[in-house]
Amino acid sequence: MTRAVLALGSNLGDRYGRLRAAVRSLDDVLLVVSGVYETPPWGDPAQPDYLNAVALVADPGAAPADWLDRCRSLERAAGRVRDPDRPYGPRSLDVDVVAVWTDDDTPVFSDDPELVLPHPRARLRAFVLRPWIDIQPYGQLPGHGWLTDLLNHDPVAGDLLELRPRPDLPLESTQ
């Protein structure tokens, strides 16, 4: 069995609807999902704000690459089109594998260009770390430490001030 943390974001079209659909598509593996946060775009400011959340998922038969396949499938279902000229550009849905653990809680590390684990920029993204704390208050990003410590240091601490909780937009499974 593997467990994984997945980061979800959308800033095009029905942002909330896309996040809800993604969470519902994860129902068979979903353990818990965070609250929703509205965040300014990261890396490419000429676009709408995002809605972001994090999900903790588990599957007895899933390998790390299976989580990546699942993320890409969710993106395709939401009409995601990748623009190689705008790697941080707008997205109908973005789903990233942030971290993966084996059934004995051993973190998975990978330098495969298709799936680097843990996600190489997760430690720098308040929009990943803050929602993750919603579901794992004592969580750690493998190789980087406690989520709370990462959030309290620059440059992440400055970005944290720009996140807006959206309790009016609940994400929940249908289980």
Image: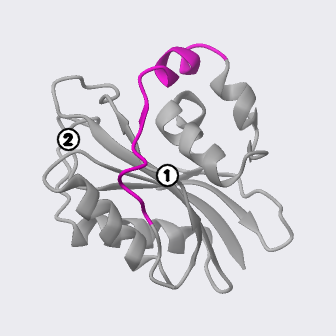
Question: Can residue 113 be seen in this snapshot?
Answer: yes
Name which residue lies at 27% across and 56% down.
16
Q: How is the image coloured?
A: one colour
Looking at the picture, tell me which residue is in the foreground, 102 or 10: 10
Question: Can residue 118 be seen in this snapshot?
Answer: no
Secondary structure category for the residue under label 2: loop
Residue 33, position as x, y percentages in the image: 54, 62
Q: Of tags 1 and 2, which is closer to the observer? A: 1
* Residue range (magenta): 153-171
The mark nearer the N terminus, 1 or 2, is 1
Above or below, 43 against 114 in this view is above
Task: Please name the amino acid that badge 2 sits on.
Answer: Pro
Looking at the picture, tell me which residue is in the foreground, 128 or 69: 128
If the image is split into quadrants, where does the N terminus sit? bottom right
Q: Residues within 10 Å of mark 2 (few under 14, many from 20)?
A: many
Above or below, 5 against 153 in this view is below
Q: What label does residue 111 carry, if any? A: none
C-alpha separation, residue under disc 1 versus residue under disc 2: 21 Å
Name which residue lies at 23% across and 53% down.
15
Q: Main secondary structure of the magenta part?
A: loop
Q: Is residue 107 left or right of residue 68?
A: right
In reply to whether residue 40 is colored magenta, the answer given is no
Above or below, 118 against 39 in this view is below
Q: Is residue 132 left or right of residue 115?
A: right
Secondary structure category for the residue under label 1: loop
Task: Please name the amino acid that badge 1 sits on.
Answer: Gly
Residue linked to disc 2 = 90
Looking at the picture, tell me which residue is in the foreground, 146 or 142: 146
Looking at the picture, tell me which residue is in the foreground, 97 or 133: 133
Residue 37, quarter of picture: top left
Residue linked to disc 1 = 35
Residue 131, position as x, y percentages in the image: 54, 45
